[in-house]
Image: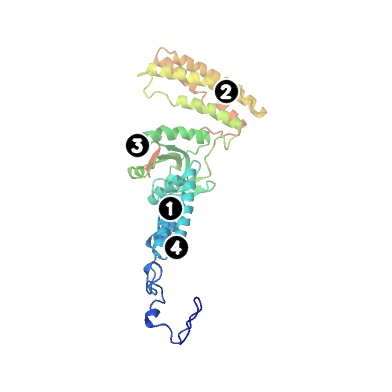
Amino acid sequence: MSIPPPPGAPQPQDPYGPPPADRSRAHGPYGPYGTAGRAYGTPVSVNALAVAALVLGLLCFVPALGLVLGLIALRQIKRSGQSGRGLAIAGAVLSCVGVVLWTVVLSTGAASKAWEGFKDGARGNETLRLDKGDCFDAPGGMEGDTYDVDPVPCAGRHDGEVFGVVTLPGGAFPGDAELTDIADERCWALQDQYAMDSWAMPADVDVYYLMPSRASWRFGDRAITCLFGHADTGSELTGSLRGDPTTLDTDQVVFLSTANAFDAALYEEPEDTPEDDLAGHRAWATRVHDVLGEQIEALRGHSWPSGARQPVADLVADLEDARDEWARASEAADADTYLTHYDRAYAYVDGPSTVTARKALALASTPPAYDEDEGGSAEAQV
């Protein structure tokens, strides 16, 4: 009779192995399954949210959504045993980076600039990107296609030069007629600020402007671009026409500012003749008299270089005489008397003393020739 081994002693190993029923439990108490009840050898599925999180993280289109999907995917993977944990982590990290980038873009205003660039590209319209002082070539010249222009250096030959940009308020499209009126008024005013010396302006140069169309207005186009162009079709400008405080010295700016203020007053002359509107002409002569007085005071009050002191003093003396004639014209009792003083006063405009003073200040010294039938500016829609 055999004696059983004491408690706790190792059992002798059966040389034939465990019975078949015991082998079935070698995989564990629940049969041949692994984690979460998945049979060994079964393909592991990839979590769909993890893939979506990675895609959104790479695109940076909606980074916040990518981050949320990545976190949800990690939780689902932990519970279900699916693969894709690395994808979910990568998507969440990229989405965090995207959130930071969007925050920087929105806080610096770069998004607005990018949107403007997108709109310009969608329209294929480079004129909306032109700024004051830019020169460009247009495919068909100033009378041709202005929907696409090529910026070029102003030192060489070019079709146009921008001297001002008028930004309009929002709202409904005002219509072509109103835009034309605004362009006529604003562009001509900006012209004298950009090219202060009217004597230096070539006679064959016209003022043009590019206006928004109804279609471009819907894209946010609110700019009227004022520019110089050659009056003759097929001809080009050479060199910049800019003559303002960025290119002129202080003495030249003071002289031209006073001259331009006086010229602006002269341009307001009534359209009707003195015979038809004597009261209107007398009132205008009073305004010219007053502006001329301001010009004289400005010229007297400035410290001129030695070579220009006497020429400017001689000009001031002539302006005093002209001012007296404007005063008499403003008090004329009839049209004939008015015209007599009017002609005497105008004889001093752009006279010999003006030419001498301009030469002393190194300004253009040839008076411009004005065409009585000279038309207005040209326009184009963009």
Crowd tier of the residue under label 2, counting other residues whose Cα lies within 10 Å: few below 14, some 14–19, many 20 or above: some
Q: At numbered mark 2, what does the secondary structure look like: helix, strand or loop?
A: helix
Q: Is residue 162 visible?
A: yes
In the image, residue 174 above or below residue 93: above
The residue that disc 2 covers is 298
Residue 308 is labelled as: none
> Along the polypeptide, which appears first: circle 2 or circle 4?
4
Camera-near label (2 vs 3) is: 3
Q: Quadrant of residue 267?
A: top left
**Amino acid identity at mark 4:** Arg
Q: How many marks?
A: 4
> Along the polypeptide, which appears first: circle 3 or circle 4?
4
Residue name at image x 34 percent, y 34 percent? 178
Q: Nearer the viewer, residue 223 or 72?
A: 72
Residue 171 is labelled as: 3
Crowd tier of the residue under label 4, counting other residues whose Cα lies within 10 Å: few below 14, some 14–19, many 20 or above: many
**Amino acid identity at mark 1:** Pro
Distance, label 2 to label 3, CA atoms, is 43 Å
Distance, label 2 to label 4, CA atoms, is 80 Å
**Amino acid identity at mark 3:** Gly
> Along the polypeptide, which appears first: circle 2 or circle 3?
3
**Amino acid identity at mark 2:** Ala
The residue that disc 4 covers is 85
Distance, label 3 to label 4, CA atoms, is 52 Å
> Along the polypeptide, which appears first: circle 4 or circle 1?
1
The residue that disc 1 covers is 63
- Whether tag 3 and tag 4 are in contact, CB under 8 A, the answer is no
Distance, label 4 to label 1, CA atoms, is 18 Å
Crowd tier of the residue under label 1, counting other residues whose Cα lies within 10 Å: few below 14, some 14–19, many 20 or above: many
